[in-house]
Amino acid sequence: MDKFPDVLCGWSWEENKLFELALAVVDERNPDRWEVVAAMVGGKKTAEDVHKHYVILLEDLHFIESGKLDHELGETQPSIQVDCTQSVCWTDDDNNLLVRLDIN
């Protein structure tokens, strides 16, 4: 969990959405899968970056599905403080994009 702020801040909201879309459309058997996904994310991430992001996503899913979360959805829980001074996690531009795309 020590890397959580870096993982969160290292990818913008838009990059994460493009990453999710790329994973949905690029065949797992494609030998150039990570290069193609990196290109679809916008070209600022390397194949290694997107592969690492994918591994972290899988680890998160396994953790969630394992039942190791000690709270119910909707319960108020203490939150962690994330320092996003090196990268922007959520900006007004991200919010405007969300509004323009009419995603709720």
Image: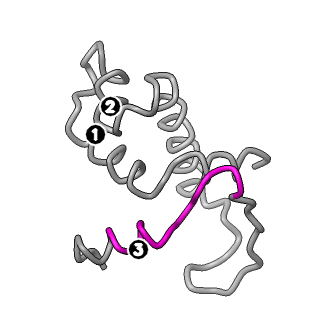
Q: Is residue 80 left or right of residue 10?
A: right
Q: Which residue is mark 3?
A: 95
Of the residues shown, which amino acid type is indicated by label 2? Val
Q: Is residue 84 left or right of residue 10?
A: right
Mark 1 Cα shell of 10 Å, populated few (<14), some (14-19), many (≥20): some
Q: Which residue is mark 2?
A: 37
Q: Which residue is mark 1?
A: 22
Residue nearer the viewer, 89 or 74: 89
* Tag 2 and tag 1, C-beta contact below 8 Å: yes
What element does badge 1 sit on? helix
Counting from the top left corner in percent of width and height, residue 51 is at 47, 28
The image shows residue 40, relative to residue 81, as above or below, that is: above
Q: Is residue 49 left or right of residue 81?
A: left
Counting from the top left corner in percent of width and height, residue 3 is at 73, 44
Q: CA distance from mark 1 to mark 3?
A: 22 Å
> For residue 100, which quarter of the picture?
bottom left
Q: Is residue 95 magenta?
A: yes
Task: Report the residue at 54% width, 31% height from top.
Answer: 52
Magenta stretch? 85-97
